[in-house]
Image (cartoon, helix red, strand yellow):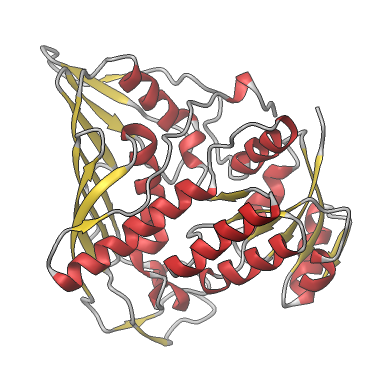
Amino acid sequence: MSTLKIGIIGCGWISSVYMENIRTYPNLSLVACADLDLEKARAQAERYGIPKACTVQELLEDPEISLVINLTLPKAHAEICLQALEAGKHVYVEKPLSISLSDAKLVLEKAQEKGLLVGGAPDTFLGAGIQTALHLIESGEIGVPIGASAFMINRGHEHWHPNPAFYYEKGGGPMFDMGPYYLTALIALLGPIKRLAGAARISYPERTVSSEPHAGEKITVSTETHISGTVEFTGGAIGSITTSFDAFGGSSLPPIEIYGSEGTLLVPDPNTFGGPVRLRKKGDDQFSDIPLISKLEENGRGIGVADMAQAIANGTAHRANGVLAYHVLEAMHGFHQSAKTGIYYRMESTCTKPDPFSISAGIST
């Protein structure tokens, strides 16, 4: 198995899980990390045994690196992706692909121009939970998919995140932060989206941080924090989704449910890789736990990069790809646009439903 040498740009909170997991994928070799704060990069390099900590420019100029993982703040995603592509490197970016659709389109166009690949988080849909649910749907266990519901409802990141302010800026909010997990999972299970409608509001114009080190500081909210929408999939199923940072009392709603002509499927939290997966078929008295079909149950962030590296080596398609990430980004913008106009938003993009994935069939840890 060939090994792809990669570099990480952005050494903040999320970088640790990538740096930890990349060491478990034999087709990936993390050779450098960079950050605007060089001391932060050096600390992560020392912690995870990364050979080189450097500036962003030094990493982009390193001829040894073939792929860049972009873990910067969302407002910098497109800029760093374009710089990496211009430097002749494939790029995999944390969600969302970009804040704006126009910038995201430039990223995909630049990649095509350069003959390079773009990948995008989340890759949680490659985990055992979503893949088991996909297997059940494609095996006909729930019959014809008719509908779906998805709920991501909590009280907001200022209660736990060490640097929560950017979650309430443009490009933040519950839809842009957590929506990619839910929409990507729904698309992986039911296919691309045809049209959608949304309603949205800012419930609290100002938030008070209770997490350290910024406890007591005030955040001015400039993006919607409670969004509900209706989704029509090209395959005919109709879904609903609610994402919220405004439920200070929490929620007991399930993450995702899929309704079919022959049964109902309870899908696990799409921000995780494992289960449980539960199925209740027509005539059953209760839901039954379904054994997972894959061993990828723990936090496997980075498996999308490993799948992308395998695609680069073999000349095949990767699953957590830029076209899928763009379709998700357009849907998220669509909910907000529909909320402003009061009319349905018809999707301009589409994507291919990702092929089923089994870690045992390709990449091994």
Q: Nearer the viewer, residue 187 or 136?
A: 187
Q: Position of residue 314 (x, y in %)?
A: 71, 29
Q: Nearer the viewer, residue 345 or 64?
A: 345
Q: Nearer the viewer, residue 145 or 330?
A: 330
Q: Tell me the residue at 61%/67% (across/down).
A: 72
Residue 229, quarter of picture: bottom left
Q: Is residue 48 left or right of residue 301?
A: right
Is residue 223 visible in this depiction of the protein? yes
Residue lying farthest to the top in this orientation: 283
Give the position of the N terminus as an image quadrant.
top right
Residue lying farthest to the front in this orientation: 113
Residue 233, quarter of picture: top left
Q: Position of residue 342 (x, y in %)?
A: 12, 68
Q: Nearer the viewer, residue 21 or 193?
A: 193
Give the position of the C terminus as an image quadrant.
top right
Q: Tell me the residue at 34%/19% (across/down).
A: 138
Q: Position of residue 226 (x, y in %)?
A: 23, 66
Is residue 55 visible in this depiction of the protein? no
Query: How many numbered badges does the structure rendering display?
Result: 0
Residue 352, quarter of picture: top left
Q: Position of residue 202 (x, y in %)?
A: 23, 76
